[in-house]
Amino acid sequence: MTTFTTNPVAFIPKERVHRPVDASIVSSLGSEPWKSSWWKTTDGERPTFLYIMAIHILAVVGLIFFATPGWRIMVATVSLAWLGGLGVTVCYHRTLAHTALRLHPAVKHLFIFFAMFNGSGSPDSWTANHRQHHSKVETFEDISSPSVGGFWWAHLRWLWQAGKIPLDRWCPDLDKSEYRFWRRMQVPLLAVSLFGGLAFGIPAFFWLGPMRLVMSLHAQCFVNSIAHMREVKEAGEDSSQNIAWLAVLHFFQGENWHRNHHAKPSSARFGWKLWQIDFGWYAIWMLELVGLATSVKRAPTRA
Ligand SMILES: [Zn+2]
Ligand SMILES: [Zn+2]
């Protein structure tokens, strides 16, 4: 059962509460940026804040005026979000961040395209933030922890308030021209993602652009926030939890089995039991069958 609490440090063991913030992450809002007002941005992150605010306002407008855009637009919207989600879970998360498998380069870059088109950022920064999260979980050094700043900090605010993560420290293996290329593509790709629907009319703009991007953003953010809001009862535990209903927002692609994942982070499979649907894993299994995924790590799957 999901446990909510208003005390942001209730989840972490007392001896960890007063540890200093990871000195490698510098926010211009100070050493405890979660104490700043939510609208304040750290240096260089004002565009991130304005982008997130803008897509939310546009998504609400779209929902009010174009709630039923027709089946073609709805299918296109869900398809792009589905491919973007698969790109994040199979490529960003399981392949790049945890090296739980290797993907054929063509498949890898196709997944990166769809993940970036879905607003998930460049592969190197996603990987760096995620590795930092696993490495520092349940401490003040975890950049996106609800233990540190509460629900909204973990869900969204860290994106514009926490400060930039040093890529050379967390993902030196991604310091390659192929990933630097995608970093340079981030803004143009996001512009096409946001406005490209205009070519198909105004309802298509709202659904394929801001409404899809907002839905996909929150699906991912819930993994940072509520998937880490389980009260820690025993020493050595972390706050990660499996949340069955979150599977709907993730199109049953497996990210909602977050406790399984923290228990065996190097496993390419997140859904351990038959009923824990994990389309990310099924996709990997099929890619492996045709030789497009190799070195797939399988951890023992006892829940
Ligand atoms: Zn986690
Ligand atoms: Zn992970």
Image (cartoon, grey):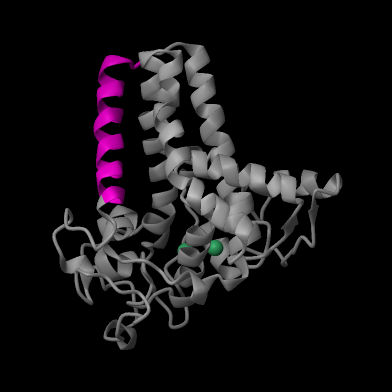
Q: Is residue 61 above or below residue 178?
A: above
Q: Is residue 163 above or below residue 236?
A: above
Percent position (x, y) of residue 280? Answer: 65, 47
* Residue found at x 36% / y 23%: 206
**149 with respect to 279 (left or right):** left
Residue 38 magenta-highlighted: no
Q: How many marks?
A: 0
* Residue found at x 54% / y 67%: 262
In which quadrant will I find the N terminus? bottom left
Report which quarter residue 148 is drawn in: bottom left
Percent position (x, y) of residue 165? Answer: 40, 69
Can residue 102 be seen by looking at this rendering? Answer: yes
Can residue 278 be seen by looking at this rendering? Answer: no
Predominant SS of the magenta segment: helix
Report which quarter residue 40 is drawn in: bottom left
The region drawn magenta spans: 47-67
**265 with respect to 141 (left or right):** right
Residue 57 magenta-highlighted: yes
Q: Is residue 192 above or below residue 163?
A: above
* Residue found at x 30% / y 22%: 62
- 134 or 24, nearer to the observer: 24
Residue sitting farthest toward the left:
37
Q: Is residue 58 above or below residue 33?
A: above
